[in-house]
Image (cartoon, rainbow, N blue to C red):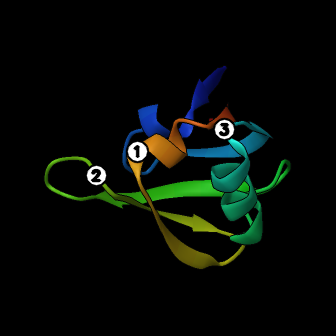
Amino acid sequence: MEKTLDLFQIGEEGVIKKVGGEGGIRRRLFDMGVTPGAKVLLRKRAPLGDPMEVTVRGYELSLRKSEASCVVMEVVK
């Protein structure tokens, strides 16, 4: 099942299928290691849901909801 990273629940895991977004946002995500094929685990969210902390390529990364909505994921059961 595919869905964007901003819709993930805490503890949910997936593999990045594609990264969208405008030029600057997309480039920033790629620079941080958010690339197709990488595994991502949603660790926690701020009280109002923004930002969120994910584990990608062995390190913790904080993303805004607007950035996470550009990342299409394949959910891993």
Question: Could you tell which of marks 1 and 3 lies nearer the N-terminus?
Answer: 3
Q: Is residue 28 left or right of residue 63?
A: right
The amino acid on which the numbered mark 2 sits, given as a three-letter code, is Asp
Residue 4: give x, y in percent of width and height: 57, 31
Q: Residue furthest bottom?
A: 59
Q: Residue furthest front?
A: 23
**Are the residues at dot 2 and dot 3 in contact (C-beta closer than 8 Å)?**
no
Image vertical order of residue 63 relative to residue 62, above or below? above
- Within 10 Å of the Cα at label 2, are there few (<14), some (14-19), or many (20+) other Cα atoms? some
Q: In whole angstroms, how far apart are the C-alphas of marks 1 and 3?
A: 12 Å
Q: Is residue 27 left or right of residue 60?
A: right
**Are the residues at dot 2 and dot 1 in contact (C-beta closer than 8 Å)?**
yes
Please identify the quadrant where the N terminus is shown.
top right
Q: Which residue is mark 1?
A: 65
Q: Which residue is mark 2?
A: 50
The amino acid on which the numbered mark 3 sits, given as a three-letter code, is Gly
Q: Please tell me whether mark 1 or mark 3 is closer to you in this view.
A: 3
Q: Residue furthest right?
A: 37
Image vertical order of residue 19 relative to residue 34, above or below? above
Q: Which residue is mark 3?
A: 21
The amino acid on which the numbered mark 1 sits, given as a three-letter code, is Lys
Question: Could you tell which of marks 2 and 1 lies nearer the N-terminus?
Answer: 2
Quadrant in which residue 72 is drawn:
top right
Image vertical order of residue 64 relative to residue 20, above or below? below
Residue 40: give x, y in percent of width and height: 63, 55
Q: Please tell me whether mark 2 or mark 3 is closer to you in this view.
A: 3
Residue at 67%, 55% in the rendered image: 24
- Within 10 Å of the Cα at label 1, are there few (<14), some (14-19), or many (20+) other Cα atoms? some
Pick whichever, 76 or 7, lies toward us.
7
Residue 44: give x, y in percent of width and height: 33, 60
